[in-house]
Structures are given as C-alpha cells and as structure tokens.
Image: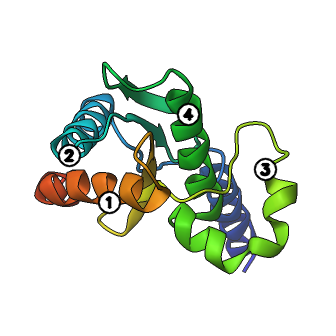
Amino acid sequence: MKKFPALLALFATASLQAADIVEEKNIGRELARDIASETVLACRTDGYHVSAVVVDRHALVRAALRDDLAARFTLEIAERKANMTVMAWMDSGEFRSLRGDIRPDLNQIDGLIVMEGGVKIVAGGYNIGAVGVSGAPGGDKDAACARKALEKLAERIEFAID
C-alpha cells in the first residue's frame, strides 16, 4: 500500500512539470509574408494603395508591406488593426460593432485601434495570427482585401497545421 502514494506523487510531479513547457501553433514568416503580399495585391487590383501587416498570435509583427503609393501612416494603422483582432480574437469590424461602448477607451491604448480592417487568421481551428489593412477608402474595403488574400491561400493555411 505504501508504494501507491509514492507512485502517485511521482506522476503528480511529472504532470505539474509538463505545464512548464507550452506548445503552441503560430504563424510562420513565409506564410505571413505571402498573406501580406496577397493582401496588398488584392487591394491594388481594386485600385487601392494599402499597407498590410501580419502579426502572430501574440501580436508580434511577422510581415509588413506597404504599397508604393500608400501613405506611411497606413503601416501603423494596419498594425494596430491587427493587434485589436488578436486581442479580441474576432475581426476588428465585428468587435467594433459589438463593443462600441469601450471603443474610446481602447483607442487610448498604445498599439490598438478599434477600426474595421483587421481579420483573424485561423488554421486547423487555431488562431495563429491576424492581418491588418489600411489605406482603402473604408475599413470594409480593407477587410475585403484581407479576406481575398486569405481565400486565395486558404488551402495552404488550413494544411499548415500538422
């Protein structure tokens, strides 16, 4: 009988130590680069000059691309839209419509902006990042460009997760 508590203690310690290591699914550099590029190209096809910023699940920039004729400020705005998407884990336009009550407060937080144009990136059911877009005449058009890029790369994104 005395072996059981010792064995239980050994397994309990092992399971506690397992929490010290975190495995996660996150977006890679190449996929982030291609999403940013396809987003800018999708907007260019529609006649808009934008910037696209892809962040990982921790809101760290993985890729940023500014169209030749996009204003330099579009990079910062796109990043802030992507960050908002990661914080809420929903597209920034959806969050904006649901939480207008806290919009002024959130807009005061460095790195966030509650505007349409941020779209989450999901692979195999995992939130792996977000793409933010700025420069089209309206956040709905920014988001549409991001969605076109994600649709174009959908198969690659879905099968990126083992």
Mark 4 vs mark 1: in front = 1
Q: Which mark is residue 60?
A: 4
Which image quadrant is residue 9 in?
A: bottom right
- Looking at marks 2 and 3 on the same chain, the residue that comes earlier in the sequence is marked by 2
Residue identified by numbered label 1: 144
**Where in the figure is residue 145, as x and y percent of width and height?**
29, 52
Quadrant in which the C terminus is drawn = bottom left
Q: Is residue 44 left or right of residue 102?
A: left
User: How far apart are the alpha carbons under marks 2 and 3?
Assistant: 28 Å
Tell me if I can see residue 162 in this picture: no
Disc 1 to disc 2: CB gap under 8 Å:
yes
User: How far apart are the alpha carbons under marks 3 and 1?
Assistant: 23 Å
Quadrant in which the N terminus is drawn = bottom right
Residue identified by numbered label 3: 107
* Kind of residue sitting beneath label 4: Leu
- Looking at marks 3 and 1 on the same chain, the residue that comes earlier in the sequence is marked by 3
User: How far apart are the alpha carbons under marks 3 and 4?
Assistant: 19 Å
* Kind of residue sitting beneath label 3: Asn
User: How far apart are the alpha carbons under marks 2 and 4?
Assistant: 23 Å
The residue positioned 36% from the left and 69% from the top of the image is: 125
Tell me the SS state at disc 3: loop
- Looking at marks 4 and 1 on the same chain, the residue that comes earlier in the sequence is marked by 4
